[in-house]
Image (tube, rainbow, N blue to C red):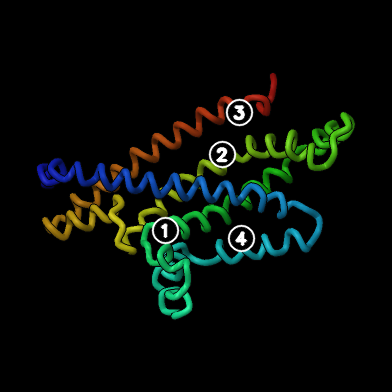
Amino acid sequence: MNLQVMWDSLPLYLAGAGTTLQLLAAALAIGLAAALPLAVLRSLPSAWAWRPVWLFTYVIRGTPLLVQLFLLYYGLAQFEWVRASAAWPLLKSAWFCAVAAFAINTCAYTVEILHGAIKAVPAGEVEAARALGMGRWQALRRIVLPSALRRSLPAYGNEVVLMLHGTALASVVTLHDLTGVAREVNSIHYLPFEAFVTAALCYLVITVVLVGAFQLAERRWLRPFAPRG
């Protein structure tokens, strides 16, 4: 193993890690912001409200993230009306398409995570809110959603880690994330093992930090749900 090449390439990997974290943060922020109202609609009894959301999550979760990224970055460009539209300056940007694909993907999974957490809120909590005179939307905002967000932390933590690993696909649309840097180092030095092991170690470090942060959050926010001896 050529450790010198790995050490000399470290600044490139740090820059790639910065790109990876920016992609991850943007996708998670947009995805979570969109998932909250969609999860509420998904939990409503009206079929006109939940069926379109269900269809969206079913399609997105049923197709590979790589295909979704290709459709956004390469597929839309073949249509003349897309290239002539006002949205073309964004759609021709690899950064925008990568963030959009990642955000749409994580949004679909987060909707189902939150939907399950909303359904898991004990009926007693809702009944207590109504007994205090809260309406449906007030109880949703003050009781159901806070409780559901806490309960969804473990599952959402797994989704964040999976999304981190999913950002490795950004390199296929020319972005220099961690995987893109590993490909570049390999193309220069012809050392695939060293190049991709270094990238894997970087992903591992980020994953450990993310998992640790979610464990701290779970200890704090899930403490009221812990069984009392």
Disc number lying in front (2 or 3) = 3
x, y percent for residue 163:
45, 50
Q: Residue at x 59, y 51 (%)?
A: 34
Of the residues under marks 2 and 1, which one precedes in the sequence? 1
Q: Label 2 amino acid? A: Pro
Along the viewing direction, whichever of 97 and 188 lies nearer the viewer? 97
Real-space Cα distance between discs 2 and 4?
Answer: 20 Å
Question: Residue 206: in sight, yes or no?
Answer: yes
Of the residues under marks 2 and 4, which one precedes in the sequence? 4
Disc number lying in front (1 or 3) = 1
Along the viewing direction, whichever of 135 and 153 lies nearer the viewer? 135
x, y percent for residue 51:
72, 63
Disc 4 marks which residue? Answer: 57
Q: Is residue 29 left or right of residue 179?
A: right
Q: Which mark is residue 154?
A: 2
Real-space Cα distance between discs 1 and 4?
Answer: 21 Å
Disc 1 marks which residue? Answer: 96
Q: Label 4 amino acid? A: Thr
Of the residues under marks 4 and 3, which one precedes in the sequence? 4
Query: Secondary structure under badge 3?
Result: helix
Q: Is residue 90 above or below residue 220?
A: below
Q: Is residue 3 left or right of residue 213?
A: left
Disc 3 marks which residue? Answer: 221
Of the residues under marks 1 and 3, which one precedes in the sequence? 1
Q: Is residue 96 left or right of residue 182?
A: right
